[in-house]
Protein backbone atom coordinates (compact mmCIF):
# COMPACT_ATOMS: atom_id res chain seq x y z
CA UNK A 1 0.00 0.00 0.00
CA UNK A 2 1.34 3.44 -0.90
CA UNK A 3 2.27 5.60 2.10
CA UNK A 4 0.07 8.55 1.05
CA UNK A 5 -2.94 6.24 0.80
CA UNK A 6 -2.17 4.85 4.24
CA UNK A 7 -1.95 8.35 5.70
CA UNK A 8 -5.27 9.28 4.12
CA UNK A 9 -6.96 6.18 5.54
CA UNK A 10 -5.56 6.95 8.98
CA UNK A 11 -6.78 10.54 8.80
CA UNK A 12 -10.26 9.41 7.78
CA UNK A 13 -10.45 6.93 10.64
CA UNK A 14 -9.14 9.13 13.43
CA UNK A 15 -11.81 11.04 15.38
CA UNK A 16 -11.72 14.82 15.21
CA UNK A 17 -12.33 17.56 17.77
CA UNK A 18 -16.00 18.14 17.14
CA UNK A 19 -19.23 16.46 18.17
CA UNK A 20 -20.84 14.00 15.80
CA UNK A 21 -21.68 10.37 15.46
CA UNK A 22 -20.08 7.65 13.43
CA UNK A 23 -20.64 3.90 13.40
CA UNK A 24 -19.54 1.62 16.21
CA UNK A 25 -16.20 0.10 15.34
CA UNK A 26 -12.76 0.93 16.63
CA UNK A 27 -14.05 4.00 18.46
CA UNK A 28 -17.66 2.95 18.88
CA UNK A 29 -19.37 6.32 18.66
CA UNK A 30 -18.89 10.09 18.53
CA UNK A 31 -15.79 11.64 17.12
CA UNK A 32 -13.13 12.35 19.71
CA UNK A 33 -9.67 13.81 19.64
CA UNK A 34 -6.43 11.92 18.96
CA UNK A 35 -3.63 14.50 19.00
CA UNK A 36 -2.60 15.23 15.42
CA UNK A 37 1.07 15.28 16.36
CA UNK A 38 0.85 11.73 17.61
CA UNK A 39 -0.82 10.56 14.42
CA UNK A 40 1.83 12.31 12.33
CA UNK A 41 4.51 10.84 14.55
CA UNK A 42 3.13 7.35 14.05
CA UNK A 43 3.18 7.73 10.29
CA UNK A 44 6.63 9.29 10.11
CA UNK A 45 8.29 7.19 12.80
CA UNK A 46 7.03 3.81 11.78
CA UNK A 47 7.74 4.50 8.13
CA UNK A 48 11.11 6.08 8.75
CA UNK A 49 13.05 3.78 11.06
CA UNK A 50 14.87 4.10 14.35
CA UNK A 51 15.64 7.82 14.20
CA UNK A 52 12.01 8.69 13.62
CA UNK A 53 10.94 6.20 16.28
CA UNK A 54 12.80 8.42 18.73
CA UNK A 55 10.60 11.31 17.55
CA UNK A 56 7.52 9.18 18.16
CA UNK A 57 8.65 8.46 21.71
CA UNK A 58 8.52 12.19 22.37
CA UNK A 59 5.08 12.52 20.79
CA UNK A 60 3.66 9.78 23.01
CA UNK A 61 4.40 11.76 26.18
CA UNK A 62 3.70 15.25 24.80
CA UNK A 63 0.21 16.51 25.72
CA UNK A 64 -1.76 19.07 23.67
CA UNK A 65 -0.75 22.04 25.84
CA UNK A 66 2.99 21.37 26.01
CA UNK A 67 4.86 24.65 26.10
CA UNK A 68 1.76 26.79 26.63
CA UNK A 69 1.31 29.34 29.40
CA UNK A 70 -1.57 29.65 31.85
CA UNK A 71 -2.83 32.65 29.88
CA UNK A 72 -2.87 30.62 26.66
CA UNK A 73 -4.90 27.74 28.07
CA UNK A 74 -7.28 29.55 30.43
CA UNK A 75 -9.67 30.39 27.58
CA UNK A 76 -11.07 26.90 28.10
CA UNK A 77 -12.07 27.90 31.61
CA UNK A 78 -13.93 30.97 30.36
CA UNK A 79 -15.80 28.87 27.81
CA UNK A 80 -16.70 26.32 30.49
CA UNK A 81 -18.21 28.95 32.78
CA UNK A 82 -19.74 31.09 30.06
CA UNK A 83 -21.26 28.48 27.77
CA UNK A 84 -21.25 25.06 29.43
CA UNK A 85 -23.08 25.77 32.70
CA UNK A 86 -20.03 25.08 34.83
CA UNK A 87 -20.50 26.95 38.12
CA UNK A 88 -16.84 27.89 38.56
CA UNK A 89 -13.29 26.79 37.87
CA UNK A 90 -10.81 26.09 40.63
CA UNK A 91 -7.14 26.17 39.64
CA UNK A 92 -4.48 24.28 41.60
CA UNK A 93 -0.70 24.45 41.25
CA UNK A 94 0.94 21.03 41.32
CA UNK A 95 4.35 19.49 40.77
CA UNK A 96 7.08 18.65 40.23
CA UNK A 97 7.20 19.10 37.34
CA UNK A 98 5.25 22.32 37.74
CA UNK A 99 1.78 22.56 36.23
CA UNK A 100 -1.51 24.28 36.97
CA UNK A 101 -4.61 22.07 36.96
CA UNK A 102 -8.07 23.35 36.00
CA UNK A 103 -11.04 21.83 37.85
CA UNK A 104 -14.58 22.48 36.61
CA UNK A 105 -17.04 22.43 39.52
CA UNK A 106 -20.66 21.29 39.14
CA UNK A 107 -22.89 21.71 42.21
CA UNK A 108 -25.78 19.39 43.17
CA UNK A 109 -28.72 20.34 41.01
CA UNK A 110 -31.22 20.19 43.87
CA UNK A 111 -29.43 22.98 45.73
CA UNK A 112 -28.87 20.78 48.80
CA UNK A 113 -25.46 20.37 50.45
CA UNK A 114 -23.36 17.83 48.53
CA UNK A 115 -23.55 14.18 49.60
CA UNK A 116 -19.84 13.92 48.83
CA UNK A 117 -17.43 14.82 46.05
CA UNK A 118 -16.76 12.87 42.88
CA UNK A 119 -13.79 13.76 40.69
CA UNK A 120 -14.28 13.05 36.98
CA UNK A 121 -11.25 12.24 34.80
CA UNK A 122 -11.14 12.25 30.99
CA UNK A 123 -9.39 10.12 28.38
CA UNK A 124 -6.13 10.29 26.42
CA UNK A 125 -7.55 11.91 23.31
CA UNK A 126 -10.10 14.35 24.71
CA UNK A 127 -10.59 16.61 27.72
CA UNK A 128 -13.07 17.68 30.41
CA UNK A 129 -15.73 18.76 27.90
CA UNK A 130 -16.30 15.12 26.98
CA UNK A 131 -16.94 14.18 30.61
CA UNK A 132 -19.43 16.93 31.41
CA UNK A 133 -22.32 14.53 30.85
CA UNK A 134 -20.99 12.27 33.59
CA UNK A 135 -20.40 15.28 35.81
CA UNK A 136 -23.97 16.48 35.36
CA UNK A 137 -25.34 13.00 36.13
CA UNK A 138 -23.35 13.03 39.37
CA UNK A 139 -24.57 16.54 40.23
CA UNK A 140 -28.14 15.41 39.57
CA UNK A 141 -27.53 12.54 42.03
CA UNK A 142 -26.56 15.05 44.73
CA UNK A 143 -22.76 15.00 44.50
CA UNK A 144 -20.43 17.90 43.93
CA UNK A 145 -18.76 16.86 40.67
CA UNK A 146 -15.27 18.16 39.88
CA UNK A 147 -14.33 17.56 36.26
CA UNK A 148 -10.55 17.70 36.08
CA UNK A 149 -8.45 18.69 33.08
CA UNK A 150 -5.39 16.47 33.48
CA UNK A 151 -1.97 18.07 33.10
CA UNK A 152 -1.42 19.36 29.58
CA UNK A 153 -5.10 19.23 28.56
CA UNK A 154 -7.80 21.90 28.08
CA UNK A 155 -7.35 24.58 30.76
CA UNK A 156 -4.38 22.89 32.45
CA UNK A 157 -0.72 23.53 31.78
CA UNK A 158 1.93 20.82 31.68
CA UNK A 159 4.60 19.66 29.27
CA UNK A 160 4.38 15.87 29.69
CA UNK A 161 1.78 13.16 30.05
CA UNK A 162 2.99 10.16 31.99
CA UNK A 163 0.31 7.47 31.77
CA UNK A 164 -0.56 7.90 35.50
CA UNK A 165 3.00 8.10 36.90
CA UNK A 166 2.81 11.83 37.69
CA UNK A 167 -0.94 12.39 37.19
CA UNK A 168 -1.67 10.35 40.32
CA UNK A 169 0.48 12.77 42.33
CA UNK A 170 -1.23 15.74 40.67
CA UNK A 171 -4.62 14.40 41.77
CA UNK A 172 -3.48 13.97 45.36
CA UNK A 173 -2.25 17.58 45.41
CA UNK A 174 -5.52 18.76 43.87
CA UNK A 175 -7.45 16.95 46.59
CA UNK A 176 -5.20 18.41 49.30
CA UNK A 177 -5.87 21.94 48.08
CA UNK A 178 -9.59 21.56 47.39
CA UNK A 179 -10.13 20.03 50.84
CA UNK A 180 -8.30 23.01 52.33
CA UNK A 181 -10.52 25.40 50.35
CA UNK A 182 -13.66 23.57 51.43
CA UNK A 183 -14.48 22.71 47.82
CA UNK A 184 -13.99 18.95 48.19
CA UNK A 185 -16.13 17.42 50.94
CA UNK A 186 -15.86 13.74 51.98
CA UNK A 187 -16.61 11.06 51.14
CA UNK A 188 -14.50 11.14 48.00
CA UNK A 189 -15.13 9.21 44.79
CA UNK A 190 -13.55 9.19 41.33
CA UNK A 191 -15.12 8.38 37.96
CA UNK A 192 -12.71 7.93 35.06
CA UNK A 193 -12.88 6.99 31.39
CA UNK A 194 -10.00 5.27 29.56
CA UNK A 195 -6.81 7.19 30.44
CA UNK A 196 -8.83 8.79 33.24
CA UNK A 197 -9.97 5.38 34.49
CA UNK A 198 -6.38 4.23 34.84
CA UNK A 199 -5.44 7.52 36.50
CA UNK A 200 -8.31 7.10 38.97
CA UNK A 201 -7.08 3.64 39.98
CA UNK A 202 -3.46 4.79 40.18
CA UNK A 203 -4.53 7.71 42.38
CA UNK A 204 -6.56 5.45 44.67
CA UNK A 205 -3.54 3.17 45.02
CA UNK A 206 -1.59 6.03 46.59
CA UNK A 207 -4.29 7.99 48.41
CA UNK A 208 -6.34 6.30 51.16
CA UNK A 209 -8.85 9.18 51.15
CA UNK A 210 -10.43 7.78 47.97
CA UNK A 211 -13.47 5.76 49.02
CA UNK A 212 -14.85 4.54 45.70
CA UNK A 213 -13.78 4.41 42.05
CA UNK A 214 -15.72 3.85 38.85
CA UNK A 215 -13.24 2.98 36.08
CA UNK A 216 -14.49 2.56 32.51
CA UNK A 217 -12.20 1.06 29.84
CA UNK A 218 -8.91 1.64 31.63
CA UNK A 219 -5.52 0.19 30.67
CA UNK A 220 -3.39 -1.93 32.98
CA UNK A 221 0.02 -0.33 32.29
CA UNK A 222 1.82 1.95 29.86
CA UNK A 223 4.15 -0.91 28.98
CA UNK A 224 1.23 -3.08 27.85
CA UNK A 225 -1.09 -0.56 26.21
CA UNK A 226 1.33 1.51 24.11
CA UNK A 227 2.39 -1.19 21.59
CA UNK A 228 -1.23 -2.29 21.19
CA UNK A 229 -2.40 1.30 20.70
CA UNK A 230 0.21 1.97 18.03
CA UNK A 231 -0.48 -1.30 16.24
CA UNK A 232 -4.21 -0.63 16.29
CA UNK A 233 -4.29 2.89 14.88
CA UNK A 234 -1.41 2.40 12.44
CA UNK A 235 -1.57 -1.31 11.66
CA UNK A 236 -0.24 -1.19 8.05
CA UNK A 237 2.88 0.66 9.18
CA UNK A 238 3.78 -1.70 12.02
CA UNK A 239 4.34 -4.83 9.98
CA UNK A 240 7.79 -6.10 10.87
CA UNK A 241 8.07 -4.01 14.05
CA UNK A 242 8.82 -6.63 16.69
CA UNK A 243 8.07 -6.63 20.41
CA UNK A 244 11.64 -5.75 21.34
CA UNK A 245 11.49 -2.59 19.21
CA UNK A 246 8.22 -1.57 20.83
CA UNK A 247 9.64 -2.22 24.30
CA UNK A 248 12.54 0.09 23.50
CA UNK A 249 10.15 2.72 22.18
CA UNK A 250 8.05 2.68 25.35
CA UNK A 251 11.12 2.89 27.57
CA UNK A 252 12.42 5.81 25.51
CA UNK A 253 9.06 7.57 25.86
CA UNK A 254 9.14 7.22 29.65
CA UNK A 255 12.71 8.51 29.76
CA UNK A 256 11.73 11.53 27.68
CA UNK A 257 8.76 12.11 29.99
CA UNK A 258 11.03 12.10 33.05
CA UNK A 259 9.46 9.15 34.85
CA UNK A 260 10.18 5.51 35.59
CA UNK A 261 8.25 3.17 33.32
CA UNK A 262 7.30 0.93 36.25
CA UNK A 263 5.62 3.95 37.89
CA UNK A 264 3.00 3.75 35.12
CA UNK A 265 1.87 0.29 36.27
CA UNK A 266 -1.83 0.57 37.10
CA UNK A 267 -2.17 -3.11 38.03
CA UNK A 268 0.38 -2.57 40.79
CA UNK A 269 -1.60 0.40 42.09
CA UNK A 270 -4.78 -1.66 41.97
CA UNK A 271 -3.19 -4.18 44.29
CA UNK A 272 -2.46 -1.45 46.85
CA UNK A 273 -5.77 0.38 47.10
CA UNK A 274 -8.33 -0.12 49.83
CA UNK A 275 -10.99 1.71 47.82
CA UNK A 276 -14.04 -0.02 46.36
CA UNK A 277 -13.37 -0.21 42.62
CA UNK A 278 -15.94 -0.92 39.91
CA UNK A 279 -14.29 -1.74 36.59
CA UNK A 280 -16.44 -1.65 33.45
CA UNK A 281 -15.21 -2.55 29.98
CA UNK A 282 -16.80 -2.91 26.57
CA UNK A 283 -16.52 -6.42 25.17
CA UNK A 284 -15.84 -5.05 21.65
CA UNK A 285 -13.16 -2.60 22.76
CA UNK A 286 -10.35 -2.80 20.19
CA UNK A 287 -8.39 0.21 21.44
CA UNK A 288 -8.09 -0.99 25.06
CA UNK A 289 -9.09 -4.67 25.02
CA UNK A 290 -11.24 -5.96 27.92
CA UNK A 291 -8.36 -8.13 29.07
CA UNK A 292 -6.90 -4.97 30.58
CA UNK A 293 -9.98 -4.55 32.75
CA UNK A 294 -9.92 -8.21 33.74
CA UNK A 295 -6.26 -7.92 34.68
CA UNK A 296 -6.95 -4.90 36.85
CA UNK A 297 -9.92 -6.55 38.54
CA UNK A 298 -7.85 -9.65 39.25
CA UNK A 299 -5.39 -7.55 41.25
CA UNK A 300 -8.09 -5.87 43.33
CA UNK A 301 -9.35 -6.36 46.86
CA UNK A 302 -12.63 -7.92 48.01
CA UNK A 303 -14.42 -4.64 47.19
CA UNK A 304 -13.65 -4.95 43.47
CA UNK A 305 -16.15 -5.83 40.76
CA UNK A 306 -15.74 -6.31 37.00
CA UNK A 307 -18.62 -5.65 34.59
CA UNK A 308 -18.30 -6.53 30.90
CA UNK A 309 -20.48 -4.22 28.81
CA UNK A 310 -21.99 -6.18 25.90
CA UNK A 311 -21.72 -4.98 22.28
CA UNK A 312 -19.65 -1.89 23.17
CA UNK A 313 -16.50 -0.47 21.63
CA UNK A 314 -14.17 1.91 23.44
CA UNK A 315 -16.19 5.08 22.92
CA UNK A 316 -19.38 3.02 22.90
CA UNK A 317 -18.69 2.41 26.60
CA UNK A 318 -18.29 6.16 27.07
CA UNK A 319 -21.45 7.00 25.12
CA UNK A 320 -23.46 4.59 27.27
CA UNK A 321 -26.54 4.82 25.06
CA UNK A 322 -28.66 2.49 27.21
CA UNK A 323 -27.49 4.08 30.47
CA UNK A 324 -26.16 0.87 31.97
CA UNK A 325 -22.72 2.25 32.83
CA UNK A 326 -24.28 5.31 34.45
CA UNK A 327 -26.72 3.21 36.49
CA UNK A 328 -24.05 0.74 37.61
CA UNK A 329 -21.62 3.54 38.46
CA UNK A 330 -24.09 5.62 40.45
CA UNK A 331 -25.25 2.55 42.38
CA UNK A 332 -21.64 1.72 43.17
CA UNK A 333 -20.89 5.20 44.48
CA UNK A 334 -24.11 5.21 46.50
CA UNK A 335 -23.19 1.90 48.09
CA UNK A 336 -19.59 2.58 49.03
CA UNK A 337 -19.55 6.34 49.64
CA UNK A 338 -22.57 6.13 51.92
CA UNK A 339 -20.78 3.53 54.04
CA UNK A 340 -17.84 5.89 54.58
CA UNK A 341 -19.90 8.87 55.78
Image (cartoon, helix red, strand yellow):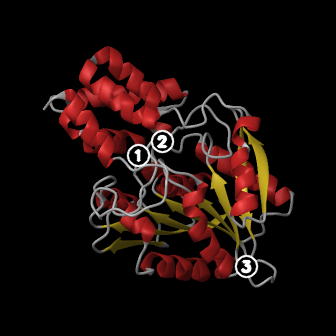
Question: Circles 2 and 1: CB distance less than 8 Å?
Answer: yes
Residue 66: quarter of image:
top right
Residue 194: quarter of image:
bottom left
Label 1 environment density (alpha carbons within 10 Å; few <14, some 14–19, many ≥20): many
Residue 169 location, x and y as percent? 65, 44
Residue 307 location, x and y as percent? 37, 73
The numbered mark at residue 264 is 2
Q: Residue at x 37, y 39 (%)?
A: 223
Residue 277 location, x and y as percent? 50, 68
Q: Is residue 284 left or right of residue 135?
A: left
Kindly state the secondary structure of the residue where label 2 is placed.
helix
Whether residue 207 is visible here, answered yes or no, is: no
**Which quarter of the rendering shows the N terminus?**
top left
Q: Earlier in the sequence, mark 3 or mark 2?
A: 2
Kindly state the secondary structure of the residue where label 3 is placed.
loop
Q: Residue at x 43, y 52 (%)?
A: 267
Q: Earlier in the sequence, mark 1 or mark 3?
A: 1
State the CA–CA distance, disc 2 to disc 1: 6 Å
Residue annotated with mark 1: 221
Kindly state the secondary structure of the residue where label 1 is placed.
loop
State the CA–CA distance, disc 3 to disc 2: 31 Å
Amino acid sequence: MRLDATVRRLAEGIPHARPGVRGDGLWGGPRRVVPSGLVAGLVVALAGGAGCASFLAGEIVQPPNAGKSVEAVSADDRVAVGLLDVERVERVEVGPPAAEIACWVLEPTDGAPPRGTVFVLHGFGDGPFWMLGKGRALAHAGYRAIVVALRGYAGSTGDVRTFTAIERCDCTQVLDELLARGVAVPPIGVWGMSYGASTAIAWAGEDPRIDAVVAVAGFSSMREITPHFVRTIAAPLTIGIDDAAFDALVLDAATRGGFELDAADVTGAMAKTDAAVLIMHGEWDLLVPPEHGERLAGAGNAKTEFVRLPARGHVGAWMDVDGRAKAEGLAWLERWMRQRK
